[in-house]
Image (cartoon, coloured by chain):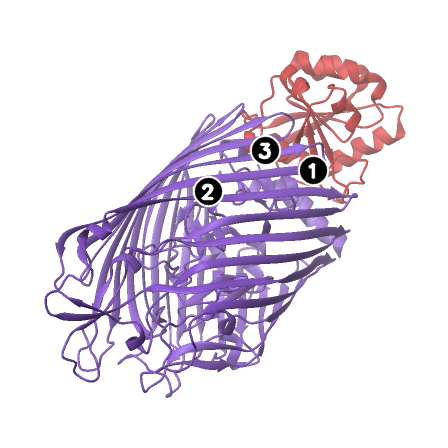
């Protein structure tokens, strides 16, 4: 069978036309085909083989995505060591790396083709607002540990870079339609068309809807539970002339879903986002230069239908991000590279519940990376980045003003670091010692939001939940020691890690009386602020093994994570919904199996165990509490059938075992089935 | 049609074909490719046959023809040459012919690249390792994309 599979691979490789891969500065598909393994730029900025990167990294290829039972990016990531995926609701997911589980996780930076899709207004990622159909993904790269020296703020616990497919020299189209229980319906498609020699265009679109999960009566819920809806359309134009590659693109996406806010209040959100982006890359004899920029817009509505008697009460936030970057790679010696980069960013929010009409900041950054190789066995990588941020507020100041406007006129600097030492041991082993210092930036909302509270009992003074312009970035130190060993087609990996997060920020929860500060402006006003919740440390071990035997692929891993924390009391009333120790499972294990002999049928399954946790939620009595989430063994599976080389069908199921704790949410998980057809032309 | 994975000593043709795509100015249209072999060397003949079978199984743009090491004068018009093993005594002549005709030479014989007589060496066991000789590439006016060069061993 293996011989048959290799024969098909060889034929496929030979049948491919010789397209000028060099013209695309980094053609991930072509580089993977020639090197026999995925290639990434997400660790140092230079192209590197997945097995040689100086960090703990996950790379999920298009082939793996196509066979996976997962329906989205978090579902694909959850089967790997060190990763927690909490599906708080049917639409809202959070991905945490090495602990620190929290809704609206602000410490994982998420990019699509290097462009930020992490939402700066609140410091979070809406995985239904990525603007990329899963079928359009070439590979997903996740780097565990701080990556701020390359990517700047918010890559504090890691970074996810989603690489999309690029047009080749022949037209191609994909159409996917799927239906499932819980009234799930999804249609997605993409078209890639070469317009002329060296010029191609890609169009993609998708629409999704499904029912929300059933919320237990014991939990506080919005006045109306909405369906999950997500739509997107995007387009990109690619051109290469000689050694220069240019890309221009844009997209629009919308998403409506119920979410747990950082305060752990369930709330209905509606997002509409748009972007335009462009990049020019010039390949040179000594390396390469890249200039890129993007503008992201976000129109977010928070808390729609939050109150039964005031269905339209909502928080409106408009966010605009403008980013311009330039970077150069220079090769020297046998295999050494230096990378120099710079970035300017302007980020602002305009909203109806802020200290002033506009809260904004500008960030100027420079970064450098040096990757040195000493013979074939030792590599040393060091990287540093300097960020300088200027905060500001403009426009009419909301009254009563309990902040001094001058407090928004501040600036601060941070230096992020990464370093790694790789040593080849014998013919098949590699030791990796690496670490870093990264930062999570307080979000614009955290700096400047100002929400009047409606209290159950009328008070003689108004109460506000507010941000603070005095908050500082949350710093994370990380260190790890890893060993990887290849035994034929089997790969074994072991990593021990330690991370320390200082001055983590949390949203006010229950028990506001412990948080309130009073101001006379001139009438009395009470304010509960976003504030420093404390420190926490995580350490643990990740063990992984993976391999291929004939048509069978397999992958298994186990993660032990211990969390120490220095945070406030968790006795009722709980003032801050923040306890990484309670919310992060101590044990996780995954077993993934796939069978594909290249015939008509293929199978894939993932079994995942997570130990019990406690997660925050407001009770129906409006009290913040910790709810036990039971340990769980969840099984996902997918069976596919290829009718022809162009038409394939599949049936997939998530949480076949109907384990309530699989979602890691106070809202129990349900089982979801779906079936679909995929037409590729 | 029968294609099998090449042995460790034979050229991995799918990888070799991909390598061509990373040239800064890849050949357009059909790519005339020579298989340089020694008729009197059984291993060389076997490798040439293996390469032919691999190429013949597909419908790509690679067009191969065998050229005996004693007939290097017929290389004109060729853009790429797959150099079989067993030609160490003739590597100087092969390099000179490649330089005259601007031919990118690709081989599984590491010594040919180490001595700057071939441009690219491909090893596939235990995993793909590609070696590019700068001097040999310069001699035949071959330039590769920098992303590719950052993933290979340049000597």
For mark 2, give the secondary structure.
loop
Q: Residue at x 56, y 39 (%)?
A: A382
According to the picture, the residue beneath numbered tag 3 turns out to be B148
Q: Nearer the viewer, residue A23 or A555?
A: A555
For mark 1, give the secondary structure.
strand
Residue that protrudes farthest toward the left in the picture: A522
According to the picture, the residue beneath numbered tag 1 turns out to be A378
Depth check, mark 2 against mark 1: the one in front is 1
Categorize mark 3 by other alpha carbons within 10 Å: few (<14), some (14-19), many (20+): many
Q: Which residue is drawn at 48% across and 78% down?
A: A669
Q: Which of B73 and A609 is in front in this view?
A: A609
- Is the residue A326 above or below the residue A665 in the image? above
Residue A174: numbered disc: none
Query: Which one of the lettered chains is coloured purple?
Result: A
Q: Is label 2 in contact with label 1 (beta carbons under 8 Å)?
A: no
According to the picture, the residue beneath numbered tag 2 turns out to be A167
Q: Which chain carries label 3?
A: B
Q: Marks 2 and 1, how far apart in space?
A: 37 Å
Q: Which of A117 and B23 is in front in this view?
A: A117
Query: Which one of the lettered chains is coloured red?
Result: B
The answer to whether one can see residue A544 in this image is yes
- Is the residue A553 above or below the residue A518 in the image? above
Q: Which of A324 and A637 is in front in this view?
A: A324
């Amino acid at each position: 069978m293996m011989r048959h599979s290799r024969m098909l691979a060889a034929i496929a490789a030979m049948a491919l036309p010789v397209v000028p891969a060099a013209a695309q500065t980094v053609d991930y598909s072509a580089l993977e085909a020639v090197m026999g393994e995925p290639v990434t730029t997400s660790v140092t900025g230079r192209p590197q083989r997945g097995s040689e990167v100086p960090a703990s990294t996950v790379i999920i290829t298009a082939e793996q995505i196509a066979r996976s039972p997962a329906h989205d990016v978090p579902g694909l990531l959850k089967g790997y060591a060190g990763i927690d995926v909490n599906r708080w609701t049917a639409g809202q997911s959070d991905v945490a790396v090495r602990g620190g589980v929290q809704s609206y996780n602000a410490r994982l930076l998420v990019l699509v083709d290097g462009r930020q899709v992490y939402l700066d207004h609140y410091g979070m990622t809406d995985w239904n607002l990525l603007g990329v159909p899963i079928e359009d993904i070439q590979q997903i790269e996740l780097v565990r540990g701080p990556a701020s020296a390359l990517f700047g703020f918010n890559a504090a616990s890691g970074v996810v870079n989603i690489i999309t497919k690029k047009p080749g020299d022949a037209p191609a189209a994909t159409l996917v339609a799927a239906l499932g229980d819980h009234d799930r319906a999804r249609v997605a498609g993409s078209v890639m068309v070469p317009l002329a020699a060296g010029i191609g265009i890609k169009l993609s679109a998708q629409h999704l809807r499904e029912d929300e999960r059933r919320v237990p009566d014991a939990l506080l819920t919005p006045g109306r539970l909405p369906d999950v809806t997500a739509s997107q359309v995007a387009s990109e134009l690619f051109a290469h002339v000689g050694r220069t590659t240019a890309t221009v693109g844009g997209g629009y996406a919308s998403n409506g879903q119920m979410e747990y806010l950082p305060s752990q209040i369930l709330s209905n959100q509606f997002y509409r986002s748009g972007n335009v982006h462009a990049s020019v890359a010039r390949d040179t004899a000594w390396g390469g230069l890249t200039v890129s920029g993007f503008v992201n817009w976000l129109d977010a509505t928070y808390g729609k239908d939050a109150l039964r008697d005031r269905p339209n009460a909502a928080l409106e936030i408009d966010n605009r991000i403008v980013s311009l970057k330039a970077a150069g790679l220079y090769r020297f010696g046998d295999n050494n590279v230096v990378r120099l980069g710079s970035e300017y960013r302007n980020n602002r929010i305009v909203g109806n519940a802020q200290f002033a009409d506009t809260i904004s900041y500008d960030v100027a950054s420079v970064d450098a990376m040096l990757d040195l190789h000493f013979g074939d066995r030792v590599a040393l990588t060091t990287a540093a980045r300097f960020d300088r941020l200027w905060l500001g507020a403009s426009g009419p100041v909301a009254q009563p003003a309990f902040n001094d406007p001058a407090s928004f006129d501040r600036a601060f600097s941070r230096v992020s670091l990464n370093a790694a030492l790789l040593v080849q041991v014998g013919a098949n082993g590699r030791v990796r010692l690496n670490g870093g210092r990264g930062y999570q930036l307080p979000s614009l909302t955290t700096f400047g939001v100002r929400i009047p509270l409606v209290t159950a009992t009328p008070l003689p003074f108004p109460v506000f939940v507010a941000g603070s312009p005095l908050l500082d970035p949350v710093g994370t130190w990380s260190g790890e020691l890893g060993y990887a060993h290849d035994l034929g087609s089997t790969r074994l990996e072991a990593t021990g890690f330690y991370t320390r997060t200082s001055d983590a920020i949390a949203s006010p929860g229950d028990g506001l009386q412990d948080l309130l500060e009073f101001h006379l402006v001139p009438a009395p006003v009470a304010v509960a602020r976003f504030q420093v919740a404390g420190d926490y440390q995580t350490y643990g071990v990740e063990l992984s093994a993976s391999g291929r035997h004939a048509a069978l692929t397999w992958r298994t891993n186990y993660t032990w994570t211990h969390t120490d924390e220095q945070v406030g009391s968790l006795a009722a009333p709980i003032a801050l919904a923040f306890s990484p120790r309670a919310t992060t499972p101590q044990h996780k294990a995954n077993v993934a199996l796939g069978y594909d002999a290249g015939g008509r049928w293929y199978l894939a399954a993932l079994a995942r165990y997570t130990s019990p946790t406690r997660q925050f939620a407001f009770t129906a009595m409006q009290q913040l509490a910790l709810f036990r989430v039971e340990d769980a063994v969840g099984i996902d599976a997918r069976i596919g059938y290829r009718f022809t080389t162009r038409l394939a069908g599949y049936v997939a199921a998530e949480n076949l075992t109907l384990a309530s704790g699989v979602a890691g949410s106070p809202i129990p998980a349900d089982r979801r089935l779906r079936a679909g057809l995929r037409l590729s032309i | 049609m029968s294609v099998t994975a090449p042995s460790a000593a034979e050229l991995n043709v799918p990888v070799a074909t991909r390598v061509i795509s990373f040239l800064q100015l890849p050949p357009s249209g059909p790519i005339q490719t020579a298989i340089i072999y020694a008729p009197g060397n059984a291993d060389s003949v076997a490798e040439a046959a293996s390469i032919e079978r691999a190429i013949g199984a597909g419908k790509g743009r690679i067009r191969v023809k065998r050229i005996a090491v004693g007939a290097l004068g017929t290389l004109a018009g060729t853009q790429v040459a797959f150099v079989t093993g067993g030609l160490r005594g003739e590597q100087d002549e092969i390099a000179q012919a490649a330089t005259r005709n601007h031919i990118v030479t690709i081989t599984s014989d590491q010594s040919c690249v180490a001595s700057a007589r071939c441009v690219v060496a491909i090893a596939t066991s235990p995993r793909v390792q590609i070696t590019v000789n700068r001097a040999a590439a310069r001699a035949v006016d071959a330039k590769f994309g920098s992303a590719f060069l950052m993933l290979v061993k340049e000597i």
